[in-house]
């Protein structure tokens, strides 16, 4: 009887601390990785095989079309695009987040963008810094929310 009471007390304490931590936006007692499997950093890290439709060696120009060659190097690969750290430029941020979004569209069921939507939105966003920044933010939100 004493062991059951102790176990019940331990479980209720654990549940309360987990709820408090979740309300504060922090991980609870047991940390599980529920976010991050869809970010550019995840895809550039090699933790998971890339979808067959988009090999790591695919160039940005071949994937996103000739309009992309006006803003990016013609030999720039998607792997390089996801690994970039130059977040100060809206067009580079767009490419980084769009590359991850494209991979997610192929690899993650329920991802909010299809592959053709990602490609179309990238081409449309290449018209200005503002459009690129806004679309990069949209892709970033989708990538962060994805499991």
Image (cartoon, rainbow, N blue to C red):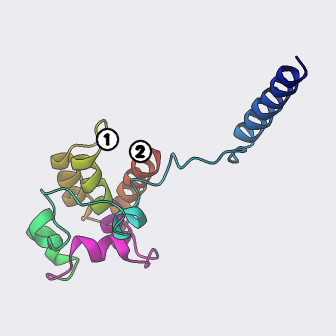
> Is 21 drawn above or below residue 97 in the view shown?
above
Could you tell me which residue is drawn at 38 percent across and 70 percent down?
45
- Residue 128 placement: quadrant: bottom left
Q: Position of residue 13 (x, y in %)?
A: 83, 31
Q: Secondary structure at mark 2?
A: loop
Q: Are marks 1 and 2 in contact (CB under 8 Å)?
A: yes
Could you tell me which residue is drawn at 31 percent across and 41 percent down?
111
Q: Position of residue 124 (x, y in %)?
A: 22, 56
Q: Which residues are magenta?
A: 74-97
Q: Position of residue 105 (x, y in %)?
A: 25, 47
Give the residue pinned by disc 2: 146
Q: Is residue 130 left or right of residue 102?
A: right
Q: Which mark is residue 111?
A: 1
**Along the line of sight, which residue is nearer the eye, 88 or 79?**
79
> Is 60 drawn above or below residue 4 in the view shown?
below
Instruction: Give the position of the C terminus as an image quadrant.
Output: top left
**Along the line of sight, which residue is nearer the eye, 90 or 4?**
4
Instruction: Give the position of the N terminus as an image quadrant.
Output: top right
> Is 139 drawn above or below residue 127 in the view shown?
above
**Along the line of sight, which residue is nearer the eye, 79 or 72?**
79
């Amino acid at each position: 009887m004493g062991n059951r009471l102790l176990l019940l007390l331990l479980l209720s304490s654990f549940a309360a601390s987990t709820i408090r931590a979740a309300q504060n936006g922090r991980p609870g007692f047991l940390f599980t990785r529920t976010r991050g499997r869809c970010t550019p950093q995840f895809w550039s890290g090699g933790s998971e095989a890339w979808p067959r439709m988009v090999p790591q060696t695919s160039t940005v120009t071949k994937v996103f079309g000739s309009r992309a060659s006006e803003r990016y190097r013609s030999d720039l690969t998607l792997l390089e695009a996801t690994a970039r750290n130059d977040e100060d430029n809206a067009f580079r941020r767009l490419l980084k987040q769009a590359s991850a979004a494209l991979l997610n569209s192929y690899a993650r069921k329920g991802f909010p963008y299809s592959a053709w939507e990602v490609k179309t939105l990238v081409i449309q966003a290449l018209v200005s810094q503002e459009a690129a920044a806004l679309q990069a933010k949209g892709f970033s939100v989708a990538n962060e929310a994805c499991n």
